[in-house]
Amino acid sequence: MNLHWLLRVPERVKFKVAVLVYKTLHGLAPRYLGPLTRVADLPGRRSLRSASANRLDIPFVQLSTVGGRAFSVAGPRVWNSLLDHVISAETLIAFRHRLKTFLFQQSYSH
């Protein structure tokens, strides 16, 4: 069964954005999506617990209505909301499967 099509619209949007982030981080996406900065790659973060986490830096935006929709902001926001089990997937196929399961459970557990 393809759980992706059973997801509600907000979860489908998260799915698409998260897959694009995964592809960007693994060199599978077009270059125009740009580099995403991992929290551990920021200067001065080596001594913090977040330095070992697989999380992304969310850039500050002036206009929350427009700027928050940019891939450079929305992508890290969605990525950071995922469980470590999901984002640590070795392959795109495994990532998509874990992501669908996670979003399905999140969508229908309420």
Image (cartoon, rainbow, N blue to C red):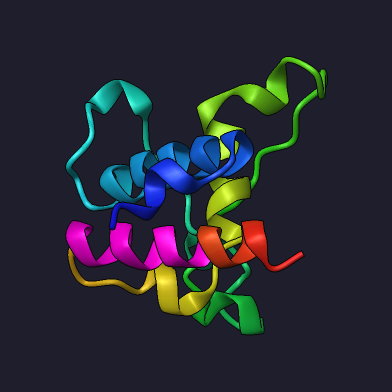
Residue 38: x %, y % from top left: 48, 58
The residue lying at 60 percent from left, 36 percent from top is: 74
**Depicted 107 relative to depicted 21: above or below:** below
In the picture, measured across the screen, residue 10 lies left or right of residue 72, that is: right
**Depicted 64 relative to depicted 78: above or below:** above
Q: Nearer the viewer, residue 29 or 16?
A: 16
**Depicted 110 relative to depicted 62: above or below:** below
In the picture, measured across the screen, residue 77 lies left or right of residue 21, that is: right
Residue 79: x %, y % from top left: 53, 54
Q: Quadrant of the C terminus?
A: bottom right
The residue lying at 57 percent from left, 61 percent from top is: 43
The residue lying at 43 percent from left, 79 percent from top is: 85
Quarter-of-image position of residue 64: top right
Q: How many marks?
A: 0
What's the magenta region?
92-102
Dominant secondary structure (helix, strand or loop) of the stretch shown in magenta:
helix
Does the image show residue 38? yes
Does the image show residue 42? no
Q: Quadrant of the N terminus?
A: bottom left
**Magenta-span inclusion, residue 98:** yes
**Magenta-span inclusion, residue 109:** no
Q: Nearer the viewer, residue 55 or 87?
A: 87
Residue 10: x %, y % from top left: 62, 37
Q: Nearer the viewer, residue 32 or 89?
A: 89
The residue most toward the front is 1
Residue 61: x %, y % from top left: 75, 28
